[in-house]
Image (tube, grey):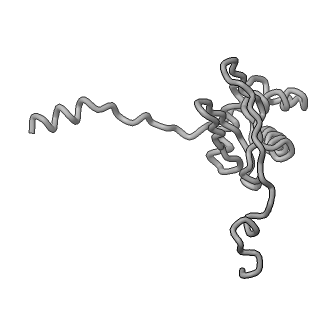
C-alpha cells in the first residue's frame, strides 16, 4: 500500500485543457476562419510562418498578431475545419496546415541546406513494371 501511494503522488496530473475562447466577435471570427481556410485551400499545405505571410498580404483587420493566428488555427483544428500534417524528411520535421480535402502529397516548401551533403544524381527506370516482370498480357 505504501508503494501505491508513492506511485500515485510521484506522477504529474494531466494538464487541464480548457476550450479555446477567441477574443473577437463570432462574425469576425467566422471571417478570419474563412480567409485562413481559403488561403490554405488555394496555396496548399503551409507552415505557420508561410500562412502568416499570406494573411499579412490579405490584410485582415481582426488578426493583429501571429500568436492570435496560431490560436485561431488551433481553434479551427478543434472544430475539424483544417488538419495538421507532418513532413518528416530525415532528422527534420515540418508541420503543415492543410484542409481536409487536399491530397496528402506534400511538396517541400523550404529546402533543407546542409553543407556536408554532396549532390548525387540518380537515374530512374521509367519502363512499366509489367514489362520488367513479364506480366504484359496476363492480368
Q: Is residue 114 visible?
A: yes
Can you name the residue that lies furthest to the bottom here? 138
> Which of the 4 quarters of the picture holds residue 22?
top right
Residue 78 point in image, percent of width and height: 62, 46
Relative to 74, is 56 on the left or the right? right
Query: From the viewer's perspective, is residue 116 above or below residue 97?
Result: above
Quadrant of image for the C terminus: bottom right
> Which of the 4 quarters of the picture holds residue 74?
top right
Q: Residue at x 67, y 46 (%)?
A: 83
- Identify which residue, 84 or 128, lies in the foreground: 128
Quadrant of image for the N terminus: top left
Query: From the viewer's perspective, is residue 107 above or below residue 116?
Result: below
Relative to 97, is 32 on the left or the right? right
Q: Is residue 30 visible?
A: no
- Identify which residue, 22 or 127, lies in the foreground: 127
Residue 24 point in image, percent of width and height: 74, 33
Can you name the residue that lies furthest to the right here? 58
Relative to 2, is 48 on the left or the right? right
Q: Residue at x 84, y 31 (%)?
A: 55
Q: Residue at x 73, y 33 (%)?
A: 47
Query: From the viewer's perspective, is residue 40 above or below residue 131?
Result: above
Amino acid at each position: 500500500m505504501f508503494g501505491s501511494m508513492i506511485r500515485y503522488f510521484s506522477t504529474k496530473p494531466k494538464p487541464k485543457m480548457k476550450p479555446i475562447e477567441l477574443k473577437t466577435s463570432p462574425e469576425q471570427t467566422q471571417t478570419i476562419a474563412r480567409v485562413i481556410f481559403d488561403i490554405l485551400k488555394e496555396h496548399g499545405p503551409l507552415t505557420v510562418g508561410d500562412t502568416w505571410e499570406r494573411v499579412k498580404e490579405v490584410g485582415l483587420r481582426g488578426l493583429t498578431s501571429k500568436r492570435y493566428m496560431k490560436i485561431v488555427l488551433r481553434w479551427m483544428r478543434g472544430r475539424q475545419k483544417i488538419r495538421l500534417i507532418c513532413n518528416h524528411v530525415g532528422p527534420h520535421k515540418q508541420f503543415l496546415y492543410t484542409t481536409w480535402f487536399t491530397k496528402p502529397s506534400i511538396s517541400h516548401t523550404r529546402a533543407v541546406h546542409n553543407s556536408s551533403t554532396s549532390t548525387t544524381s540518380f537515374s530512374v527506370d521509367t519502363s512499366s513494371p509489367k514489362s520488367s516482370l513479364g506480366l504484359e498480357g496476363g492480368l
